Image: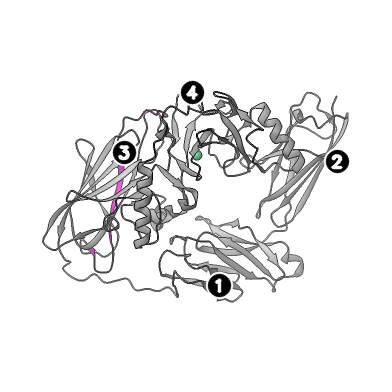
Amino acid sequence: MKYLFIALIFSQITFSQVEYPKDYFRSPLDVTLILSGSFAELRTNHFHSGLDIKTQQRTGLNVYAAAEGYVSRIKIQHYGYGKALYVTHPNGYTTVYGHLQAFAPKIEAYLKAKQYEKESYEIELFPTAEELQIMTDEVIAYSGNTGGSGGPHLHFEIRDQQERTINPLLFGLDVKDSKPPTLTSVFAYPKDDKSTINNSNSRLELRFMPGKNNEYKVESIQASGEIGFSIGSHDQLDLAVNKNGLSNIQTFFNGNKKFEMDFFRFSFDESRHINRFIDYEYYKTKRTHLQKLFVEKGNVLSMFKDLDDDGYITVEEGTSSVYKVRLQDFAGNESWITIPITGKKPDSIPSKPENKKNYYVFSDQATTLNDKNVTVSFPANSFYEDTFIDFKVNNDTLYLDKDVIPLQKNVTIQYDISHFKDSEKDRLYIAELLGYKKYPSYLNTRRKENFLTASSNALGSYVLVLDTTKPTIAPVNFQDGKWLSKYRYLTLKITDDLSGIGNYRATINGKWILMEYEYKDNTLTFDFNDNIVTDTKNELKVIVTDNVGNSATFEATFFRK
Ligand SMILES: [Zn+2]
């Protein structure tokens, strides 16, 4: 713990020396900069790594290189960033543009040649500094909605040479924001068995009222021992209704600083620790992010700074004190929260709830649990702290507690499937039961003889699912036997129940064609401008395979001149 603290202090010293150039990068769009998502705002399992810039509810806006440089990476995925472009600049920073609809012609030509060579839509390329050079103000792409995007926007990032992502607003991009952050909830937490808040030894929600000068007054509490707090909050910009994240949080106890968090920069490998920063159990049950104003064991986020006693306060008997929180947005607008605290031991010792869970996992040891035909393996440090968990297996359903305890590392789940018929073994997969409806969601499942194995990032319930249904394939904008001379695109709809689409392959007259898969509307699209079709009579063949290997084939003939 001591070493960690030294490392944190050291990283702050190095940060204070960093001066980000303010006039180097231009906005990647030529429309007013309005954000639907801010840097480091709280998302599921990660902090948001860039800015989400609104594109007037449409796709196809010009995307400009933020500065001169060269295309250093092109990544095309069905999910994630969709079509993404990385431009490396002479000053060492790399800008990233995600969810794009398409690229500028010279980049598009470079990409398509590689996709045809590899016979794959999904691809990752690292062009050399000479191959795709970019001038100042050059249009590099068109904005879109590809990948894991909930509506048209541009995802924009600036990364340093250590691949850490930095708030692009630190480089001088301007966003209008005159409103201070909004407080939505306040909670108090006892640190250990000896701490109490209003005679209770568990998390307690506190009432509050907005006051003058953006100050929130919280009801006074009686407390004893070491306690901490969490808040729910968001920030709204001037031209959008979206609930964005904060830029800085500080806390003070009787005027002394206890905690600061500065959301300016982070590495991707620390992003998952968001689950230790938020109240994970509350998020999973109430879908609301509570940000803890104290640092729990094992949370190595680099965005913490100036910690005193990890942000906890110690309340002495008979004292009157004040705990204050300052919430700040990037424009510097502030809201304050004031919590009066009286030091008073509880009238009676609160009774602890009895533990009814059947296993205890030591966090620093690897642990293997087994029941009937299921084995679950936790690598060392899967959990942040020693934890009681529930574990049992019933009729191929694995109950691995509930998804309310965060995991640092993935857990491996193995099923023995010897009791299934040989014909079924190839069509089984491990699914995680998600949501109120317990929908069986496919987990990437590997089979070795009589064992199926999958990895999961969460506790929860798991089942085996047998999928013997093949995908469906249907034409959208054409029919078999027709002339398609004036068509720009060929579009098909593909769906699969249960395990989901695994892969697809399309050919015309035996030659592989590039089809772009968009999972959000279940379409495969071929662009005739790829100039693959040269014959008059053409045989289209599309094979779609689901995640367990059920395969469907679609064939059609079309004519073109
Ligand atoms: Zn984004």
Q: Considering only vertical position in the picture, is 419 above or below 182?
A: below
Please tell me in which quadrant of the rendered image residue 192 appears: bottom left
Label 2 sits on what residue type? Gly
Magenta-tinted stretch: 174-197
Label 1 sits on what residue type? Val
Q: Report the Cα–Cα distance between label 4 and label 1.
A: 56 Å
Please tell me in which quadrant of the rendered image residue 327 appears: top left
Image quadrant occupied by the C terminus? top right
Q: Compare marks 4 and 2 and give the one earlier in the sequence.
A: 4
Secondary element under disc 4, as helix, strand or loop, is loop
Which of the numbered marks, if any, corresponds to residue 22? none
Q: Report the Cα–Cα distance between label 2 and label 3.
A: 59 Å
Discs 3, 1 touching: Cβ within 8 Å:
no
Secondary element under disc 1, as helix, strand or loop, is strand
- Residue 262 is situated, as x and y percent measured from the top left of the image, at 35, 44
Q: Report the Cα–Cα distance between label 4 and label 2.
A: 45 Å
Residue 381 left/right relative to 346: right
Discs 2, 1 touching: Cβ within 8 Å:
no
Q: Report the Cα–Cα distance between label 2 and label 1.
A: 49 Å
Which of the numbered marks, if any, corresponds to residue 393? 1
Please tell me in which quadrant of the rendered image residue 32 appears: top left
- Residue 25 is situated, as x and y percent measured from the top left of the image, at 47, 29
Q: Compare marks 3 and 4 and give the one earlier in the sequence.
A: 4
- Residue 73 is situated, as x and y percent measured from the top left of the image, at 61, 39
Binning the other alpha carbons within 10 Å of mark 4 as few (below 14), some (14 to 19) or many (20 upward) gives few
Image quadrant occupied by the N terminus? bottom left
Q: Which residue is mark 3?
A: 181
Q: Compare marks 4 and 1 and give the one earlier in the sequence.
A: 4
Which of the numbered marks, if any, corresponds to residue 31? 4
Q: Confirm whether residue 14 shows in the render.
A: yes
Residue at 43% from the left image edge and 62% from the top image edge? 405
Q: Which residue is mark 2?
A: 510
